[in-house]
Image: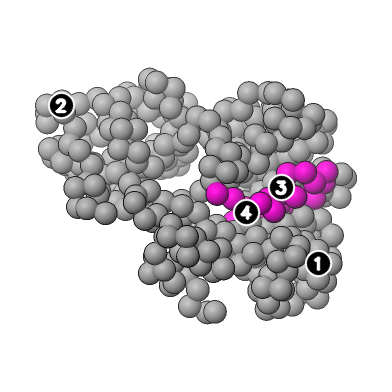
Amino acid sequence: MSEEQNNPQPIRAEESHFTLDELLDLVIDQKASDIHLSEDERIALRIDGQIQFVENIPPLTHAQTEMIIFENLLKGNEDRIRTYQSSLDMDFAYAHKDGTPFRVNIFFKKEKMATVMRRINRKAFTFEELGLPKTIDKFVRAKSGLVLVCGPTGSGKSSTLAAMIEWINQNRSSHIITIEDPIEYIFESNKSIVSQREIGHDTHSFASALRALLREDPDVAMIGELRDPETIMTAIELCETGHLVFGTFHTGSAAQTINRLIANFPSEQQSAVSTRLADALVGILCQRLIPKIGGGRTGIYELVVANGAIRNLIRQKEMAQIQSTIQTGADAGMISMKRYADQKRDKGLIREEDYRDYFTDD
């Protein structure tokens, strides 16, 4: 990729004056995933995973940053302003003038104001557009159980979850409830009813939303991040009562995911949790985004189907054996991330040097 392709075009506005709308127009035009706005620093975009500074605009002043955060993003909302000033950071959703949604985090660093805004696609991608493994079909057709989508921040987990929820919305007659912080994709009910609940607007907390969930007649639940023992156990209990549950975890492999889920609980509870998790699990999809030849990024995936062999390993806490079971589980639709990446390399889609360091333990 040429240096010219790597650099965003400068904003066509006076250096002394620009609007947040103009900056977000640039994000969209450059197909950037994020914009970084910090007091006394240059504006930066993340394009194809790389941070790139915007030309022709000097570092933001205190007044400019204050205007962006308090007058544009918080829009004079006194409750949000008090929350930001007391908690020193907060998350929320923001819609650009053209309707493009952004996930926003405002925070302080070295006592100066800053914000990062992540662009969210208004329409969920299809499985084919994301290049998901074909076995993903088993996950969305399941009537009950736990489906986990895992990977580091910025690996496309939200896009994958949205694709699965939208497939169910288009193909099954269900009540889908999502608990999100904040809402990212907007779903319009089709064959299913989709009830989206945002923390801070539609419910006070994950805990209160989860407690109410069973009284709301769900078939499918998307919990978002399984962040603590209470959330994990509620997800398992929902599966045990006949519901299909989707959640995310910030882990890089199936074995690591299971280990960390179980490690959330005291040692005396871990055997029981392992058994219940083994019974509830439908499958795990782990993913990363890497550069694609010709520009852009593409996903590489590890997919684990919870068959008898995988369930037994979870019950016995033999996580070290999971990788070898994935390698021999092709007939069940399983695939290792390295094999998936190698297949894309062989098709001329990606370069080995862009992913080989992920598999140093192989």
Residue 298 visible? The answer is: yes
**Of residues 227 and 150, the one drawn nearer to the viewer in this rendering:** 150
Q: Residues within 10 Å of mark 1 (few under 14, many from 20)?
A: many
What is the quadrant of the N terminus in the image?
bottom left
**Of residues 237 and 327, the one drawn nearer to the viewer in this rendering:** 327
Q: Tell me which label, 1 or 2, sits earlier in the chain.
A: 2
The x, y position of residue 15, in whole percent, is 12, 31
Q: Which residue is mark 2?
A: 13
User: Residues at badges 4 and 2 in contact (C-beta under 8 Å)?
Assistant: no
Q: Which mark is residue 127?
A: none
Q: At numbered mark 1, what does the secondary structure look like: helix, strand or loop?
A: helix
The stretch drawn in magenta includes residue 133: yes
Q: Residue furthest front?
A: 347
Q: Which residue is mark 3?
A: 137
Magenta residue span? 131-152
Q: Is residue 145 left or right of residue 320?
A: right
Q: Tell me which label, 2 or 3, sits earlier in the chain.
A: 2
In the rendered structure, which amino acid carries the disc numbered 1? Arg
In the rendered structure, which amino acid carries the disc numbered 3? Asp
Residue 251 picture quarter: bottom right
